[in-house]
Amino acid sequence: MTQKKLIVSVYVFVCCVVTAMGQSLKYYNADDFPLIGKMSDDTEGRYARLPLSCRGESKKWVWILGQDTPGLAVRFATNSTAIAAKWVTKRNNSMSHMAMVGVKGLDLYVLKSGKWRYVRCARPKGKENEGVIISDMKGEMNEYMLYLPLYDGIETLEIGIEEKAVIRQPQVESPVTERPVICYGTSITQGGCATRPGMAYTNILSRMLNREVVNLGFSGHGHLEYEIAELMTHRNPSVIVMDFIPNVSASMLNERIERFMSIIEDKIPGVQILFIEHVPFPLAEFNLKKGEWVEESNEALRKAFRELKKKGYQNLHYLKSEHLLGEDGESTVDGEHFTDLGFDRFAKGIYPVVKKLIRHAER
Protein backbone atom coordinates (compact mmCIF):
# COMPACT_ATOMS: atom_id res chain seq x y z
CA MET A 1 0.00 0.00 0.00
CA THR A 2 1.40 3.43 -0.90
CA GLN A 3 1.88 6.09 1.76
CA LYS A 4 -0.92 8.18 0.18
CA LYS A 5 -3.35 5.26 0.25
CA LEU A 6 -2.36 4.48 3.85
CA ILE A 7 -3.06 8.05 4.93
CA VAL A 8 -6.44 8.01 3.18
CA SER A 9 -7.33 4.64 4.75
CA VAL A 10 -6.42 5.85 8.25
CA TYR A 11 -8.42 9.05 7.72
CA VAL A 12 -11.50 7.11 6.58
CA PHE A 13 -11.16 4.69 9.52
CA VAL A 14 -10.94 7.51 12.07
CA CYS A 15 -13.94 9.29 10.52
CA CYS A 16 -15.97 6.08 10.62
CA VAL A 17 -15.15 5.53 14.31
CA VAL A 18 -16.12 9.10 15.20
CA THR A 19 -19.31 8.90 13.11
CA ALA A 20 -20.31 5.57 14.61
CA MET A 21 -19.65 6.89 18.08
CA GLY A 22 -21.67 10.01 17.40
CA GLN A 23 -24.62 8.00 16.09
CA SER A 24 -24.62 5.59 19.04
CA LEU A 25 -24.80 8.26 21.74
CA LYS A 26 -27.77 10.29 22.87
CA TYR A 27 -27.27 13.36 25.05
CA TYR A 28 -29.48 14.44 27.95
CA ASN A 29 -29.59 17.82 29.66
CA ALA A 30 -27.92 17.52 33.07
CA ASP A 31 -30.35 20.15 34.37
CA ASP A 32 -32.88 17.32 34.65
CA PHE A 33 -30.86 15.49 37.31
CA PRO A 34 -30.09 16.28 40.96
CA LEU A 35 -27.25 18.70 41.66
CA ILE A 36 -25.50 18.51 45.02
CA GLY A 37 -23.24 21.05 46.70
CA LYS A 38 -25.34 24.24 46.46
CA MET A 39 -26.56 26.48 49.26
CA SER A 40 -29.30 28.12 47.19
CA ASP A 41 -31.15 27.57 43.92
CA ASP A 42 -31.65 31.31 43.43
CA THR A 43 -28.49 31.66 41.34
CA GLU A 44 -27.45 33.16 38.02
CA GLY A 45 -27.74 29.92 36.11
CA ARG A 46 -28.00 26.48 37.62
CA TYR A 47 -24.28 25.85 37.99
CA ALA A 48 -23.30 28.68 40.32
CA ARG A 49 -22.62 28.73 44.04
CA LEU A 50 -23.57 32.24 45.12
CA PRO A 51 -27.21 33.38 45.10
CA LEU A 52 -28.34 36.51 43.31
CA SER A 53 -28.68 38.25 46.68
CA CYS A 54 -24.87 38.32 46.90
CA ARG A 55 -24.40 40.06 43.55
CA GLY A 56 -24.60 43.57 44.94
CA GLU A 57 -22.97 42.76 48.27
CA SER A 58 -19.98 40.58 47.39
CA LYS A 59 -16.68 41.96 46.18
CA LYS A 60 -15.95 41.52 42.48
CA TRP A 61 -13.76 38.44 42.75
CA VAL A 62 -15.86 36.76 45.41
CA TRP A 63 -18.78 37.00 42.99
CA ILE A 64 -16.71 35.78 40.03
CA LEU A 65 -15.33 32.82 41.98
CA GLY A 66 -18.84 32.14 43.24
CA GLN A 67 -19.77 31.25 39.67
CA ASP A 68 -17.14 28.48 39.67
CA THR A 69 -18.37 24.98 40.47
CA PRO A 70 -16.12 23.37 43.13
CA GLY A 71 -18.08 20.87 45.20
CA LEU A 72 -20.96 20.68 42.73
CA ALA A 73 -21.83 17.27 41.29
CA VAL A 74 -24.62 15.80 39.17
CA ARG A 75 -26.21 12.53 40.30
CA PHE A 76 -27.80 10.07 37.87
CA ALA A 77 -28.20 6.36 37.16
CA THR A 78 -27.73 4.53 33.86
CA ASN A 79 -27.16 1.09 32.38
CA SER A 80 -25.16 2.44 29.45
CA THR A 81 -21.89 0.74 28.53
CA ALA A 82 -20.51 4.18 27.64
CA ILE A 83 -20.84 7.59 29.28
CA ALA A 84 -19.89 10.85 27.61
CA ALA A 85 -20.25 14.55 28.34
CA LYS A 86 -20.62 17.85 26.55
CA TRP A 87 -19.90 20.98 28.55
CA VAL A 88 -19.26 24.66 28.01
CA THR A 89 -17.19 26.52 30.60
CA LYS A 90 -17.76 30.09 31.71
CA ARG A 91 -14.23 31.51 31.75
CA ASN A 92 -12.12 28.96 29.87
CA ASN A 93 -9.70 29.39 32.75
CA SER A 94 -6.17 27.98 32.90
CA MET A 95 -3.41 28.05 35.50
CA SER A 96 0.28 27.22 35.25
CA HIS A 97 0.42 25.22 38.47
CA MET A 98 -2.80 23.19 38.19
CA ALA A 99 -3.84 20.42 35.81
CA MET A 100 -6.50 21.41 33.29
CA VAL A 101 -8.73 18.51 34.34
CA GLY A 102 -8.83 19.97 37.84
CA VAL A 103 -9.39 23.50 36.59
CA LYS A 104 -12.20 22.89 34.08
CA GLY A 105 -12.67 19.16 33.56
CA LEU A 106 -15.21 16.67 34.89
CA ASP A 107 -14.75 13.64 37.12
CA LEU A 108 -16.94 10.51 37.11
CA TYR A 109 -17.54 8.20 40.09
CA VAL A 110 -19.70 5.07 40.42
CA LEU A 111 -21.38 3.70 43.55
CA LYS A 112 -20.18 0.14 44.26
CA SER A 113 -21.09 -1.77 47.44
CA GLY A 114 -22.07 1.48 49.12
CA LYS A 115 -18.77 3.23 48.32
CA TRP A 116 -17.93 5.75 45.64
CA ARG A 117 -15.26 4.50 43.23
CA TYR A 118 -13.38 6.59 40.71
CA VAL A 119 -14.11 5.79 37.05
CA ARG A 120 -12.39 8.35 34.82
CA CYS A 121 -12.14 12.05 34.06
CA ALA A 122 -13.40 14.09 31.12
CA ARG A 123 -10.51 16.09 29.69
CA PRO A 124 -11.18 19.69 28.65
CA LYS A 125 -9.95 21.13 25.38
CA GLY A 126 -11.14 24.71 25.75
CA LYS A 127 -14.37 26.57 26.38
CA GLU A 128 -16.52 24.04 24.47
CA ASN A 129 -15.84 20.39 25.24
CA GLU A 130 -17.11 16.96 24.29
CA GLY A 131 -15.76 13.50 24.91
CA VAL A 132 -16.41 9.91 25.93
CA ILE A 133 -15.47 9.44 29.57
CA ILE A 134 -15.75 5.65 29.71
CA SER A 135 -16.77 2.89 27.28
CA ASP A 136 -17.00 -0.91 27.06
CA MET A 137 -18.62 -1.33 30.48
CA LYS A 138 -20.92 -4.23 31.37
CA GLY A 139 -24.18 -2.37 30.85
CA GLU A 140 -25.45 -2.81 34.41
CA MET A 141 -27.66 -0.19 36.03
CA ASN A 142 -25.34 1.83 38.28
CA GLU A 143 -25.48 5.05 40.28
CA TYR A 144 -23.07 7.76 39.12
CA MET A 145 -21.78 11.10 40.36
CA LEU A 146 -20.19 13.60 37.97
CA TYR A 147 -18.06 16.24 39.69
CA LEU A 148 -17.85 19.66 38.05
CA PRO A 149 -14.77 21.91 37.60
CA LEU A 150 -12.90 23.40 40.53
CA TYR A 151 -11.67 26.65 38.99
CA ASP A 152 -14.17 27.41 36.25
CA GLY A 153 -17.91 27.56 35.86
CA ILE A 154 -20.36 25.65 33.70
CA GLU A 155 -22.73 27.30 31.24
CA THR A 156 -24.26 24.09 29.85
CA LEU A 157 -23.78 20.40 30.59
CA GLU A 158 -25.10 17.30 28.83
CA ILE A 159 -24.61 13.63 29.68
CA GLY A 160 -24.28 11.18 26.81
CA ILE A 161 -25.25 7.50 26.87
CA GLU A 162 -25.93 4.82 24.28
CA GLU A 163 -29.19 5.30 22.40
CA LYS A 164 -30.49 1.92 23.57
CA ALA A 165 -29.58 2.57 27.21
CA VAL A 166 -31.64 4.17 29.97
CA ILE A 167 -30.75 7.16 32.12
CA ARG A 168 -32.86 7.92 35.18
CA GLN A 169 -32.98 9.69 38.51
CA PRO A 170 -30.72 8.24 41.22
CA GLN A 171 -32.42 5.67 43.44
CA VAL A 172 -29.95 5.94 46.33
CA GLU A 173 -29.45 9.08 48.41
CA SER A 174 -25.67 9.23 48.45
CA PRO A 175 -24.28 11.44 49.69
CA VAL A 176 -26.94 12.24 52.28
CA THR A 177 -28.09 15.81 51.69
CA GLU A 178 -29.85 16.56 54.98
CA ARG A 179 -27.83 18.83 57.29
CA PRO A 180 -24.76 19.18 55.09
CA VAL A 181 -21.24 20.09 56.11
CA ILE A 182 -20.03 23.50 54.90
CA CYS A 183 -16.35 24.24 54.27
CA TYR A 184 -15.45 27.93 54.11
CA GLY A 185 -12.06 29.19 53.10
CA THR A 186 -9.38 29.87 50.55
CA SER A 187 -7.87 28.65 47.28
CA ILE A 188 -7.05 25.33 48.94
CA THR A 189 -10.65 24.94 50.06
CA GLN A 190 -11.75 25.72 46.51
CA GLY A 191 -9.54 22.88 45.28
CA GLY A 192 -6.19 24.34 44.29
CA CYS A 193 -4.30 22.44 43.01
CA ALA A 194 -6.01 19.04 42.68
CA THR A 195 -5.35 17.20 39.41
CA ARG A 196 -9.06 16.43 39.03
CA PRO A 197 -12.28 17.60 40.71
CA GLY A 198 -12.83 14.47 42.78
CA MET A 199 -9.59 15.09 44.65
CA ALA A 200 -10.49 18.42 46.27
CA TYR A 201 -10.56 17.75 50.01
CA THR A 202 -14.21 18.76 50.30
CA ASN A 203 -15.15 16.09 47.74
CA ILE A 204 -12.94 13.47 49.39
CA LEU A 205 -14.50 14.33 52.74
CA SER A 206 -18.00 14.04 51.29
CA ARG A 207 -17.31 10.53 50.04
CA MET A 208 -15.75 9.50 53.35
CA LEU A 209 -18.69 10.84 55.37
CA ASN A 210 -21.39 9.94 52.83
CA ARG A 211 -22.61 13.46 53.52
CA GLU A 212 -23.07 16.44 51.23
CA VAL A 213 -20.21 18.89 51.70
CA VAL A 214 -20.75 22.40 50.37
CA ASN A 215 -17.61 24.10 49.09
CA LEU A 216 -17.48 27.81 49.92
CA GLY A 217 -13.82 28.26 49.07
CA PHE A 218 -12.88 31.52 47.34
CA SER A 219 -9.33 31.66 46.06
CA GLY A 220 -7.48 34.51 47.79
CA HIS A 221 -10.76 35.92 49.10
CA GLY A 222 -11.70 34.03 52.25
CA HIS A 223 -12.05 37.37 54.02
CA LEU A 224 -14.93 36.65 56.41
CA GLU A 225 -17.51 38.43 54.26
CA TYR A 226 -20.75 38.86 56.19
CA GLU A 227 -22.99 37.89 53.26
CA ILE A 228 -21.21 34.52 53.18
CA ALA A 229 -21.96 34.02 56.87
CA GLU A 230 -25.61 34.74 56.12
CA LEU A 231 -25.54 32.26 53.22
CA MET A 232 -24.18 29.53 55.49
CA THR A 233 -27.36 29.62 57.57
CA HIS A 234 -29.70 28.71 54.71
CA ARG A 235 -29.60 24.90 54.85
CA ASN A 236 -29.32 24.10 58.55
CA PRO A 237 -25.80 22.63 58.33
CA SER A 238 -24.55 20.19 60.93
CA VAL A 239 -20.93 21.40 60.83
CA ILE A 240 -19.16 24.47 59.46
CA VAL A 241 -15.45 24.04 58.79
CA MET A 242 -13.66 27.39 59.01
CA ASP A 243 -10.53 27.01 56.87
CA PHE A 244 -10.02 30.70 56.08
CA ILE A 245 -7.02 31.81 58.12
CA PRO A 246 -4.40 31.85 55.28
CA ASN A 247 -6.37 34.70 53.63
CA VAL A 248 -6.77 37.09 56.57
CA SER A 249 -4.44 39.29 58.56
CA ALA A 250 -4.62 39.55 62.33
CA SER A 251 -6.29 42.96 62.05
CA MET A 252 -8.91 41.69 59.59
CA LEU A 253 -9.59 38.70 61.82
CA ASN A 254 -10.07 40.86 64.91
CA GLU A 255 -12.29 43.29 63.01
CA ARG A 256 -14.61 40.73 61.42
CA ILE A 257 -14.72 37.44 63.29
CA GLU A 258 -17.20 38.27 66.06
CA ARG A 259 -19.83 39.74 63.75
CA PHE A 260 -19.31 36.87 61.30
CA MET A 261 -19.89 34.33 64.06
CA SER A 262 -22.87 36.20 65.52
CA ILE A 263 -24.67 36.05 62.14
CA ILE A 264 -24.33 32.27 62.18
CA GLU A 265 -25.12 31.85 65.88
CA ASP A 266 -28.28 33.97 65.69
CA LYS A 267 -29.75 31.88 62.84
CA ILE A 268 -28.49 28.34 63.59
CA PRO A 269 -27.40 28.23 67.24
CA GLY A 270 -26.88 24.45 67.31
CA VAL A 271 -24.36 24.22 64.48
CA GLN A 272 -20.91 22.89 65.30
CA ILE A 273 -18.07 25.12 64.08
CA LEU A 274 -14.52 23.87 63.55
CA PHE A 275 -11.61 26.32 63.25
CA ILE A 276 -8.59 24.89 61.42
CA GLU A 277 -5.15 26.42 61.76
CA HIS A 278 -3.00 27.55 58.86
CA VAL A 279 -1.13 24.40 57.82
CA PRO A 280 2.68 24.59 58.06
CA PHE A 281 3.20 24.16 54.33
CA PRO A 282 6.73 23.40 53.07
CA LEU A 283 7.49 26.92 51.82
CA ALA A 284 7.10 28.26 55.35
CA GLU A 285 10.03 26.13 56.47
CA PHE A 286 12.45 27.98 54.19
CA ASN A 287 10.87 31.38 53.47
CA LEU A 288 11.22 33.27 56.74
CA LYS A 289 8.46 35.78 55.97
CA LYS A 290 6.05 32.98 55.12
CA GLY A 291 7.03 31.15 58.29
CA GLU A 292 6.37 34.23 60.39
CA TRP A 293 3.02 34.75 58.64
CA VAL A 294 1.91 31.21 59.48
CA GLU A 295 2.91 31.58 63.13
CA GLU A 296 1.30 35.00 63.49
CA SER A 297 -1.89 33.85 61.75
CA ASN A 298 -2.27 30.83 64.00
CA GLU A 299 -1.58 32.84 67.13
CA ALA A 300 -4.25 35.36 66.08
CA LEU A 301 -6.69 32.51 65.41
CA ARG A 302 -6.03 30.92 68.81
CA LYS A 303 -6.58 34.26 70.52
CA ALA A 304 -9.81 34.91 68.62
CA PHE A 305 -11.02 31.40 69.44
CA ARG A 306 -10.40 31.90 73.17
CA GLU A 307 -12.17 35.27 73.14
CA LEU A 308 -15.21 33.84 71.36
CA LYS A 309 -15.45 31.00 73.87
CA LYS A 310 -15.32 33.51 76.73
CA LYS A 311 -18.19 35.43 75.11
CA GLY A 312 -20.42 32.38 75.13
CA TYR A 313 -19.88 30.70 71.77
CA GLN A 314 -19.92 27.15 73.11
CA ASN A 315 -20.14 25.13 69.89
CA LEU A 316 -16.67 26.15 68.70
CA HIS A 317 -13.88 23.64 68.20
CA TYR A 318 -10.21 24.04 67.30
CA LEU A 319 -7.97 21.77 65.24
CA LYS A 320 -4.20 22.16 65.25
CA SER A 321 -2.56 21.68 61.90
CA GLU A 322 1.01 20.51 62.49
CA HIS A 323 0.40 16.92 61.34
CA LEU A 324 -2.28 17.40 58.67
CA LEU A 325 0.10 17.33 55.69
CA GLY A 326 2.61 14.77 56.92
CA GLU A 327 6.27 15.32 57.64
CA ASP A 328 7.93 14.76 54.24
CA GLY A 329 7.17 18.08 52.53
CA GLU A 330 5.68 16.32 49.50
CA SER A 331 2.08 17.53 49.80
CA THR A 332 2.11 20.66 47.64
CA VAL A 333 2.72 21.69 44.04
CA ASP A 334 4.37 25.05 44.78
CA GLY A 335 5.16 24.91 48.48
CA GLU A 336 1.66 26.14 49.38
CA HIS A 337 -1.20 24.68 47.30
CA PHE A 338 -1.99 21.03 47.80
CA THR A 339 -1.41 18.17 45.40
CA ASP A 340 -3.73 15.15 45.44
CA LEU A 341 -1.46 13.72 48.14
CA GLY A 342 -1.91 16.84 50.24
CA PHE A 343 -5.67 16.85 49.80
CA ASP A 344 -5.90 13.17 50.71
CA ARG A 345 -3.84 13.68 53.86
CA PHE A 346 -5.79 16.78 54.84
CA ALA A 347 -9.17 15.11 54.33
CA LYS A 348 -8.12 12.06 56.34
CA GLY A 349 -6.76 14.33 59.06
CA ILE A 350 -9.96 16.28 59.58
CA TYR A 351 -12.39 13.41 58.87
CA PRO A 352 -12.59 11.91 62.40
CA VAL A 353 -13.13 15.34 63.94
CA VAL A 354 -15.87 16.32 61.49
CA LYS A 355 -17.55 12.92 61.84
CA LYS A 356 -17.63 13.33 65.62
CA LEU A 357 -19.08 16.84 65.32
CA ILE A 358 -21.84 15.63 62.99
CA ARG A 359 -22.88 13.07 65.59
CA HIS A 360 -22.82 15.77 68.26
CA ALA A 361 -24.98 18.10 66.14
CA GLU A 362 -27.58 15.42 65.42
CA ARG A 363 -28.01 13.85 68.82
Image (spheres, helix red, strand yellow):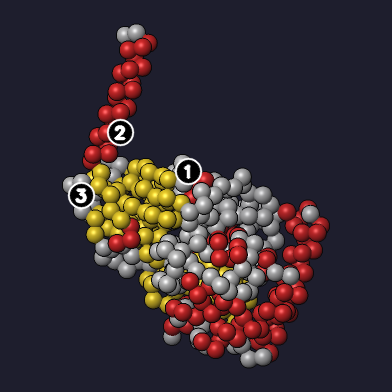
In the rendered structure, find residue 126 and report the number of the disc placed on it.
Answer: 1
| Residue beneath the point at 63% across and 57% down | 326
Q: Quadrant of residue 253?
A: bottom right
What is the residue that sits farthest to the right in this orientation? 288
164 or 270, which lies in front?
Answer: 164
In the rendered structure, find residue 18 and report the number of the disc placed on it.
Answer: 2
Name the quarter where the C terminus is drawn. Answer: bottom left
56 or 186, which lies in front?
Answer: 56
269 or 232, which lies in front?
Answer: 232
Residue 318 appears left or right of 27: right
Q: Decide: few, some or many residues near mark 1? Use Cα within 10 Å; few <14, some 14-19, many ≥20.
A: some
Q: Amino acid at mark 3?
A: Ala
| Residue beneath the point at 33% across and 65% down | 34
For residue 291, say whether it is visible: yes
Q: Position of residue 229 (x, y in %)?
A: 56, 78
For residue 143, say whether it is visible: no
Reading the image, the residue beneath label 3 is: 165
Q: Amino acid at mark 2?
A: Val
Q: Secondary structure at mark 3?
A: loop
Q: Position of residue 286 (x, y in %)?
A: 78, 53
